[in-house]
Amino acid sequence: MNTIKINRMTKQFKIIREKLSSRGGGIEITLDNFGYEGEKMTAYQNYLGGGMLGSICSDCTISGWNGDSKLLEVSQELKKHFYTLTNPENDEWASATFDEIQARPSRVY
């Protein structure tokens, strides 16, 4: 389990699936620990071409989730966690910051 801070409270999220590669990938968590039993959230990143990855996106199994401030906070923290997995600190080639990556398009088509 990984720990994130949500609404000034520390919560843990459980990773269900994780697939990372130089061409993108994704991570899926359960939202049980956040009070949404049986629901899931994902963070994913597409390959844009030329060795460049797009912005990190997220989605959720809850309809209208992007209107829920708690879920938006979980989404943001999950995206940041995904960024740390795909951009190791000691990689001289992966020098883009989280904000720089988020400024990129999510896809090219």
Image: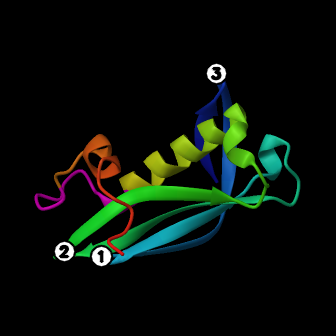
**Residue 1 horizontal/vertical position (percent):** 64, 54
| Res 51 label | 2
Element assignment for label 2: loop
Tell me if mark 2 has few (under 14), some (14-19) or many (20+) residues whose alpha carbon lies within 10 angstroms of its own. few
Element assignment for label 3: loop
| Res 22 label | 1
Near-viewer residue (90 or 71): 71
Sequence-wise, the earlier of marks 3 and 2 is 3
User: Whole-Å distance between the Cαs marked 1 and 2?
Assistant: 8 Å
Disc 1, disc 2: CB below 8 Å?
A: yes
Residue at (32%, 71%) from the top-left corner?
Answer: 108
Q: Amino acid at mark 1?
A: Ser
* The quarter of the displayed image where residue 21 is located: bottom left
Residue at (44%, 46%) from the top-left corner?
Answer: 80
Part of the protein shown in magenta = 85-94
Q: Is residue 102 inside the magenta stretch?
A: no
**Residue 105 horizontal/vertical position (percent):** 33, 58
9 left or right, relative to 49: right
Sequence-wise, the earlier of marks 1 and 3 is 3
Near-viewer residue (29 or 65): 65
Q: Amino acid at mark 3?
A: Arg
On screen, residue 8 above or below 31? above
Residue at (37%, 68%) from the top-left corner?
Answer: 107
On screen, residue 9 above or below 48? above
Q: Is residue 86 inside the magenta stretch?
A: yes
| Res 8 label | 3
- Residue at the far top in the pictured view: 8
Sequence-wise, the earlier of marks 1 and 2 is 1
On screen, residue 73 above or below 28? above
